[in-house]
Amino acid sequence: MNITVDIDGNSGFCAGVIRAIDKAEEFLDRHAGTDGKKLFSLGPIVHNDAELKRLEDKGLVCIDRDDLEEMRDAEDETLLIRAHGEPPQTYVKARAHGFNIVDCTCPVVLKLQKSIREAYERLQERNGQIVIFGKPGHAEVLGLIGQVEGKAVVIENMQMLNEAVESGEIDIQRPVEIFSQTTKSPAEYSAICSKLEVMMADANELSIERFKGTKMFIAHNTICSQVATRHAKLSAFAMDHDIVIFVSGKASSNGKVLCERCKSLNIRTYHIDSPEELKREWFREDDKVGVCGAASTPKWLLEAVAKEILSYN
């Protein structure tokens, strides 16, 4: 074979994940071999098993919400809040149990949390609603819902939007402010916003132009700019290669969105989370291979995948 391999220079950890991992490693390196302190992470710090294993070997302990509930005597233990963020009640509970908190919430998510709180206060005076375009149950979305006392409607796709309107869960005759999870597809979010705005204009018997003047519908641009530009760059990368190997944890929401984007443009796109999942039969003579990944994929893993592919030559 005469395979060539390119690693996408725009793939790999986003700034928020880099910041969280740096803070975790700083804590673990400071306490390694001295006081033996652990660092507890509420949920996986990154949706990548290989990177998680590396951090766990350093002393990171991943716990879930049930574990947090049970750890009522955690005096002088340390809890890391990952980049996704958490609802306010999580901080209250953790401090009540005695945890010191290392808050690694991404600055982009913190800004979104603040914006959604402010919108909620505005809308209470206008009998309005908060709508969130995001994955139900996702950690970031749970953190956003917590900012508004749980009073938000979460939709992930056009079908969910239609169902929410038909059922009256979204009342299109009341003011609406919509926000997006920071890692969602910009194109999907734009389509959702346009559809909802048209529905609301029709329900109020107004043209789109006149409806815009009512300020009854406000769409906030809350997708991370790094994610937004990533979609366009990844599209070009996928089309420029014969075959695409997309590397990310299967639980990564961002990974699923980006991999689907690649597959829509290049049918020979394969989703793996480690070099061991590669199959030699995927590759053809003289293939130009593109290796890329999600915001939760470490560079060292992309390099390991590229090395394994080159070994087929």
Image (cartoon, grey):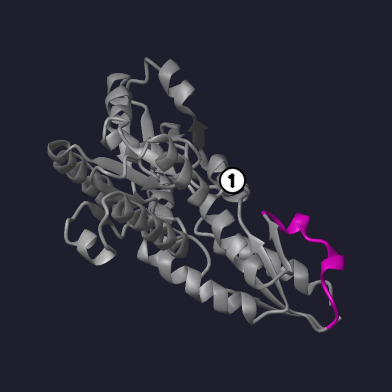
Out of 19 and 175, give the one closest to the viewer. 175
Image spot of residue 176 (x, y percent): 26, 47
Q: Is residue 269 magenta?
A: no
Q: Position of residue 299 (x, y in %)?
A: 56, 64
Task: Specify whether residue 242 is in view.
Answer: yes
Most extreme residue toward the left is 125
- Left or right of 227? Residue 178 is left
Crowd rating for badge 1 (residues with CA inside 10 Å; few <14, some 14–19, many 20+): few
Residue name at image x 41 percent, y 45 percent? 24
Q: Is residue 86 visible to the viewer in this orientation of the structure? A: no
The image shows residue 17 at horizontal and vertical percentages of: 43, 54
**Does residue 228 appear to the left or right of 282 in the view shown?**
left
Q: Amino acid at mark 1?
A: Ala
Left or right: where 46 falls relative to 263: left
Q: Which residue corresponds to the image point at 69% horizontal and 66% vertical from the top-left?
A: 245
Instruction: Please provide percent x and percent y for residue 112.
Output: 28, 50
Judging by the rendered image, the residue that carries numbered circle 1 is: 251
- Residue ID at (42%, 32%): 37
Q: Specify the quadrant of the image occupied by residue 77.
A: top left
- Residue 283 part of the magenta-drawn span: yes
| Quadrant, the N terminus | bottom right
Task: Tell which of 254 and 195 is nearer to you.
Answer: 195
Image quarter of the C terminus:
bottom right
Q: Does residue 85 lie above or below 202 as drawn?
A: above
From this view, report whether residue 146 is shown above or below residue 186.
above
Part of the protein shown in magenta: 273-285
Picture quadrant of residue 28? top left
Question: In front here: 44 or 111?
Answer: 111
Left or right? Give the position of 53 relative to 217: right
Q: Secondary structure at mark 1?
A: loop
